[in-house]
Every structure is written in C-alpha cells, then in structure tokens.
Image: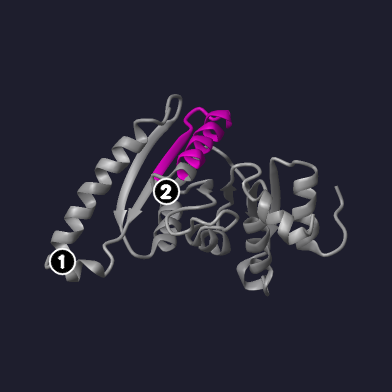
Amino acid sequence: MRVEGAALAQVVRTARDEQLDLVVLGRRPQADQLGVGSILTKVARKCPCSVLVVPAYTHVHLSRMLAPVDCSAHSKMSLEIALDIARASGESNPQALALCIYGVGYGYRYSGATLHQAGKKIEMATVQKLTEFLAEIDTSGVEFESMLLCSENVPGVIHSVSAVSKMDLIVVGSQGVGSPATGSLGGTAEKILESAYQPVLIIKRKGETDSLLRSLLGR
C-alpha cells in the first residue's frame, strides 16, 4: 500500500483505518539517519499496533529471540510472542532469552544500608518476582534461558547481551516500568529502538492507543 501526505499522520491513520496487526519500518544506518530515528520513534509511539523496525543491510533470521522483561503485563505479552516466533521459525534449535535488569538507585543511602546490602536485597526480591513471572510462561519447544543483571544502563546492557549472544530479534513491550500513560512508548523501548543493530519488534495490545489517536488525528 502506498501512503501519501504527511508521513507520520498517514502511517498512523492507515494502521488504524486498515486495522493492521503490524507496521514494518526500515531504518537507515545510524551515521546516515539525520533525524530519521526520531520519526521512527514517533511512529512506534503512536501506532495502534505492533511495530517492527529493521536496520539497513540486515539479514533477518528469527530463531534467536531476546525479550527484555520487567515482569509487567506488557513484558509477559512480548515474551510470549518472542517464544511463538522462535517456535514458528522452522529452525531445529529455536532459542529465547528473557533478560531482566534491575537497578539499586540512590534511595538506598537513606535506608542506612550499604550499596552491597541494598543490592542483595533488591536482587532477592527481583529473583522471586521473576520466578513467579516465568512460572506462568509456556516455554515448550524452545531452548529457554533467563538472565538477571544489575545495571542502571538498561538499554546498554540489552544491546551488549544481544550482541554477545548473537540474537536475531529484540522483542520488547511498548510500555514498562515508569511509563504508565497509554499511548506512550517506554523509555527503555525508545532507546533500544533508536540504536539497536538488530531488528526490534515493539509489541502493543492492538487498539491500546485508540483514544490518543482520536485526539491526534481529529476523528
């Protein structure tokens, strides 16, 4: 389908009017983006459906999935879709990695605990939360692994793990911790989208931005 007119509004309007399940966007090399990255982010933020962004010159394989999770409903949905994609890849050994990253923050200083003590306490709580979260996930048919890391640079860790593990696709929920507003794109998802060398699939619940689109598009 050819879309004419103001690119952002037309893509978003077409996705809504045609009730699309997925919008696929290409991304130029980072050195040649010249503001294109911000347009991609806006499309991903406002689209009423999931968005797949594929960097230039990428040879897409879909057997090794990386799903950053924060144990939210959106990350549960993105992990389940990552597993479904791996199963459907047709590869003999499909794989998926659920990556959970937690941070200590600066508040521990006011609790009287040392950084190590605060880190261990948060780690234990996160391990329990992640265990309960993964217990509800069907990982059958996929070589599945979970990883728990501590860092304040979440996007950087995601990029590093993706590169070292040679992942084919990063699958991330559109919203996460700290981005409760419907129609917003989680800060982590946004940073991943802007600089990932691998394709990135932003997962949304279809129609979750309908009220936002009505106000943006005027109907």
Q: How is the image coloured?
A: one colour
- Give percent across and percent down for residue 73: 46, 42
Q: Residue at x 70, y 48 (%)?
A: 23
Q: Mark 2, mark 1: which one is toward the viewer?
A: 1
Q: Amino acid at mark 1?
A: Ser
Where does label 1 land, which residue?
Answer: 111
Q: Is residue 177 visible?
A: yes
Q: Is residue 198 left or right of residue 133?
A: right
Where does label 2 land, which residue?
Answer: 165
Q: Amino acid at mark 2?
A: Ser
Q: Any mark on residue 96, and which?
A: none
Q: Is residue 65 left or right of residue 10?
A: left
Quarter of the image that includes the C terminus:
bottom right
Please, is residue 72 above or below residue 114 in the view?
above
- Give percent across and percent down for residue 15: 75, 48
Residue 38 belongs to the span the image colors magenta: no
Residues packed near mark 1 inside 10 Å, few (<14), some (14 to 19) or many (20 plus) = few
Q: Which residues are magenta?
A: 75-98
